[in-house]
């Protein structure tokens, strides 16, 4: 099972757009896409499955991009049911998670960090600072000018014109990194 985690430096930096771009660009993975949040969306259960594709919710966007399944996980205390998530995924498919905090509960094959624009008001979330220790690559909008890099690490930086359209080079890089996981 291929597992990708997408985290972001802040709110609204394009994590969902990148997840949707990866789902659409790597359809062979038959993704189960999961948004993990501490926000209350009014769901009775902590794990809720989206059934309608569309642009109204992040999970609906996942389905519209081609995900086989889309789940919303809400957690107030930071405890994330990582084992339950892995069990919800069919053998031979992929799991892609939008969360910076999941790394304390799950070991993915690939971690991609989305960088927001630098400058006035661009505060980096504490959970993303921890995420940067594990990041395999960083993604940013080509026009954003972001230059954040993990301390002591030289990792790929993919500047994209649109986060929902990963470049062919980025998709090839991700496929290569996931290839050993798809054999297991």
Image (spheres, grey):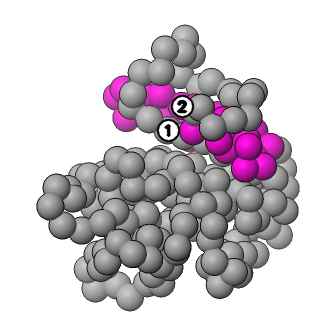
At a point 44% along the width and 77% down the height, the residue shown is 142
In the picture shown, does residue 121 fall above or below 83? below
Seen at 33% across and 58% down, the residue is 9
* Residue 149 is at least partly visible in this image: yes
Place residue 182 in its image quadrant.
Answer: bottom right
Q: Secondary structure at mark 1?
A: strand
C-alpha distance separating marks 2 and 1 = 5 Å
Pick out the residue farthest to the top. Answer: 44
> Magenta residues, as a range?
58-82
Q: Considering depth in this image, is 146 or 176 the residue closer to the camera?
A: 146
On the image, numbered disc 1 is attached to which residue? 36
Looking at the image, residue 139 lies above or below residue 97: below
Residue at 53% x, 50% y: name it. Answer: 16
Point out residue 145 in the picture as x, y percentages from the top left corner: 31, 77
User: Element type at marker 2?
Assistant: strand
Looking at the picture, tell me which residue is in the foreground, 166 or 134: 166
- The extreme left residue here reads 120
Residue 88, horizontal then vertical, whole percent: 73, 37
Residue 137 seen in the current view: no
Res 73 label: 2
Q: Is 67 situated left or right of 118 in this image?
A: right
Earlier in the chain: of badge 2 and badge 1, it is 1
Q: Are marks 2 and 1 in contact (CB under 8 Å)?
A: yes
| Residue 11 spot, x, y in % from top left | 34, 47
């Amino acid at each position: 099972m291929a597992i990708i985690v997408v985290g972001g430096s802040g709110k609204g930096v394009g994590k969902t757009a990148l997840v949707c771009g990866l789902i659409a660009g790597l359809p062979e993975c038959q993704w189960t896409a999961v948004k993990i949040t501490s926000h209350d969306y009014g769901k009775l259960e902590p794990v809720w499955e989206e059934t309608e594709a569309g642009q109204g919710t992040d999970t609906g966007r996942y389905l519209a991009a081609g995900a086989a399944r889309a789940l919303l996980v809400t957690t107030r205390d930071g405890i994330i049911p990582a084992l339950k998530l892995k069990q919800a995924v069919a053998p031979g498919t992929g799991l892609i998670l939008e969360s910076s905090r999941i790394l304390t509960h799950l070991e993915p094959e690939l971690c991609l960090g989305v960088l927001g624009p630098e400058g006035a008001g661009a505060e980096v979330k504490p959970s993303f600072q921890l995420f940067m220790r594990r990041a395999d690559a960083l993604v940013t909008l080509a026009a954003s000018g972001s230059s954040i890099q993990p301390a002591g690490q030289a990792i790929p930086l993919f500047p994209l014109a649109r986060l929902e359209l990963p470049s062919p080079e980025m998709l090839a890089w991700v496929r290569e990194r996931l290839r050993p996981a798809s054999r297991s």
